[in-house]
Image (cartoon, coloured by chain):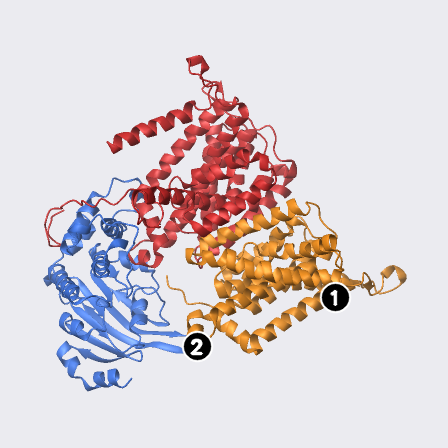
Chain colours: A orange, B red, C blue
Amino acid sequence: MNDFIQLIIAGLATGSIYALAAVGFTLLWQTSQTINFAQGEFVMLPAFFALAGMKFFGLPFPIAAIAAILLSMLTLGVLFKTVVVDPLHKQGTLPLVISTIGLAILLREGVKEFYSAEAQRFPSFFPNINIGTSAANGGSGFNVSADQIGVLIVATATILLLSWFLASTKTGRQMQATAQNPTVARILGVNVERMVMYTFLINGALAAIASLLISPIYLAKFSSGETLGLVAFVAAIVGGFNQVRGAIVGGFLVGIIDNLVAAYISTSYRQAVPLALLVMIILLRPQGLLGRAEERAV
Amino acid sequence: MNRNLKIIFGLVLVLVFIAGPADLTGLGIPWPGLKRYGTYILTLWLVTAVAAMGVNLIVGYAGQETLAQAAFLGIGAFTTALLQKAGVPFGLNFLASGVICFIVGIALGFPALRVQKHYLAFVTLAFSVFVWLLIRNEEWLTGGVNGIKDIRRPILLGISLRPALYYYWLVLALTAVLTAAMWWLLRSPWGRAFTALRENAIRAESLGIDVRGYTLMAFAIGSAYAGFAGAMYAPLVEFIDPSPFALGASLQFLLMVVAGGAGSFVGPFVGAVVAVLLPEWLRFAEGYYLIIFAIIVMLLMAFCPTGIVGLFARLTTKARRPHADDKGPSLGGPNLGGDPTAAATTVAGANS
Amino acid sequence: MNTASAALEATPASTAASKVLEVRDISKSFGGVHAVRGVTFDVREGEILGLIGPNGSGKSTLFNCILGQLTPTSGDVLVAGRSVTGLRPSELNRLGIGRTFQLLQVFPQLTVRENLILAGQEHEGSRFKRLFGPSDSGLTANANRMIDFFRLGHLAEEKAGGLSYGQQKLLDCAMAFMAGPRLVLLDEPAGGVNLTMLGNLKDRLQAINKETGATFIVIEHNMEFVMSLCTRIIVLAEGKIIAEGPPDTIRKNPQVIEAYLGH
């Protein structure tokens, strides 16, 4: 039982990070019909910004982390929008998808060539201690690291803050209006262009936070974006492609399932389980767990 | 005149493909042919182009997305390798690889195409990862990470096709057959239906075109092409393991077809040049090759989403007339003359 | 003898009294919005039925329910006495129901003739035969007849995307008639068409009706056009039929005037 609770907590911790990536993914899809195949690389890259800041500029870790978030908002937000997405929007969905696949390769290979092909240790914000007592010392055998709790708290706080922003501020509501119907939003006087830009900035920040949280656990590596992107993608679809709430639930769900499967079923097919979930959802509930059903013509 | 030129050009091209890699010095022509490695790369290009043709059918003609072409390539390659180990001749392996991929394509596409657009992409994405895990984990069948070694090249009419050049000729012949079949498919009413459902599925449906059925057929046939390519790939490389069949490779197939020119007949061949031959030419760039490749793809998408074929068409039409449209390549220009048809101006006029 | 021309040659006289389409108590709601509420009517062979009503009265929803584009919440649609509710649009089309769309729907990359051949190809033989069978010379002849009939002869080899709006509209209609349908649903055929082309269109539609006995249902906002084209008119308001009859009676019906002016 203790094992099970530990696994759930570990699952919630990684799931909260997946949720960050999935929410950004969904936001981009909603406001600008961008299916970002480089989302995993977006989560991989900011850790290297921080590492580079520490290595080349001698910044202390907290400053480097903040710099990484700001730099991510600039590059993965502003630059991504103006250089990659905007010129491609008139060309349709497929060229944009292809371009983000190209971008994923570019970021992955860029980190490999210009930083390192080796996995990098990454400092954590949280003390490296375990909460609970070991069974060997006569305790309950309950064991959760401060790292996991810290990750869970920071990621959840970020998500709550974002949800509050979207639901309760004027800008947030304008962003939601833009996501649901840009034409109507424009008629109602919303500055649609600016709202789309905010979405890209938020996605950049979310990716950076996810990156700083996950890298201490799984190390920072140029190739880690593949798995992360896949998981974000699965989480977003499982939860319902058109719902931020859905992406959050999807992220947590995938995190928990991932951990339970690895522990109880098989590590070799670990990756397949979220995907099997994805396929089941598509076949049985195409609008996703929390998504709205859309009346379909044809 | 124009037609004759085309035929001559076609014949020259066929001759170059047949004789190009061969040593012609024995015939008195000062051309030493390609070395073994060069022939190998050329063969790999053909194999890649066949799989890419399948992607082009699915993406460029039927307007769907597939992220599993490398997985189907893997299914084809392992089918051929395993059947060969069981003593089945190459001809049957080749057919079986295509047929199995066709059937799997139906099984995969049938449920996915019931739901919304883009969902075929998601399902093939999942399938892609699943197939890769299967190849990696099921050692009893696929050899796991150690793969399958010593896949032999076939013997045809008592002649061993082990030499690179002979095997190249076999692959060339099979590619020619598959290319002709694709040409004929796209010229048939099916090809017209594919174009229609890509351009406007709702209208196509209202004209009696079973959009779901045709899309499924395009997906299954496109996947079967990967199966055929896999059957040629396994004896070419002689050793297969899970790595070339991963999700990244499937994405690369999509990338090369769109970069070459999706929806254009020669697009996949051009795309395969970019994916197979370019890395060889860019050897000096080493690790930077993929970076250069990615930048080229992104620039192409931004400035010419119809790919290299579209870029070429645009450049050549611009040279001819200043106001060229950017709609991309069109097969067969409009014949402005028209033919005056028998002037029966009633619908019920003629007896048939 | 192919099915398309067989249908084109059917004479109206022999089957004049039979019902081509029966709409039985069709309702459709989206969430809480009731777009169509219990609509029932018959369409007799050979008539040109107009379907009018103010914006939001449920005309298009009703059309889409009849055509299989939407599944009705309740009710039944019968074609020649057989229930077709739940069939897909392509299956309905192969049963002989054609349609045009409110917004132009031609295939811009195909030529005018290819557009027409495409519109007819699914009505002959099996799909297997379409792949392996001989070339479609019968269809080409049919397409040429439609091209002449709709006076598009000089444009046969042009890409449809290069045609003027009115010409595309004619092509759109021609495609709906290509397979010799017994019933055609026209969604605002006059929308955006200039006066000359409008006369041309009306003339052609009436000619087809007269020659082949094909039945039409027309949604239209252009009252002049609809009153002069149709033999009978049904008026929808708020998802229900409020009036039904020949154009002259409808024109004077106070309820209809109320429905149009009251909103």
Mark 2, secondary structure of its residue: loop
Name the amino acid, label 2. Leu
Residue A149, numbered label: 1
Q: Where residue A165 appears, x then y in whole percent? A: 59, 74
Q: Is residue B193 left or right of residue C213?
A: right
- Local packing at callout 1 (Cα closer than 10 Å; few below 14, some 14-19, many 20+) is some
Q: Position of residue A21 (x, y in %)?
A: 61, 61
Of B178 and A123, which appears nearest the observer? A123
Q: Residue at x 38, y 46 (%)?
A: B263
Can residue B222 be seen?
no
What's the amino acid at mark 1?
A: Ile
**A225 up-or-down from C186: above or below:** above
Q: Chain of mark 1?
A: A
Q: Which residue corresponds to the image point at 31% horizontal and 80% vertical from the top-left?
A: C238
Q: CA distance from mark 2 to mark 1?
A: 43 Å
Label 2 neighbourhood size at 10 Å, few (<14), some (14-19), many (20+)? few
- The reply, left or right, for residue A140 in relation to residue A262 is right
Nearer to us of marks 2 and 1 is: 2
The image position of residue B304, as x and y in percent, is: 42, 49
Secondary structure at badge 1 equals helix
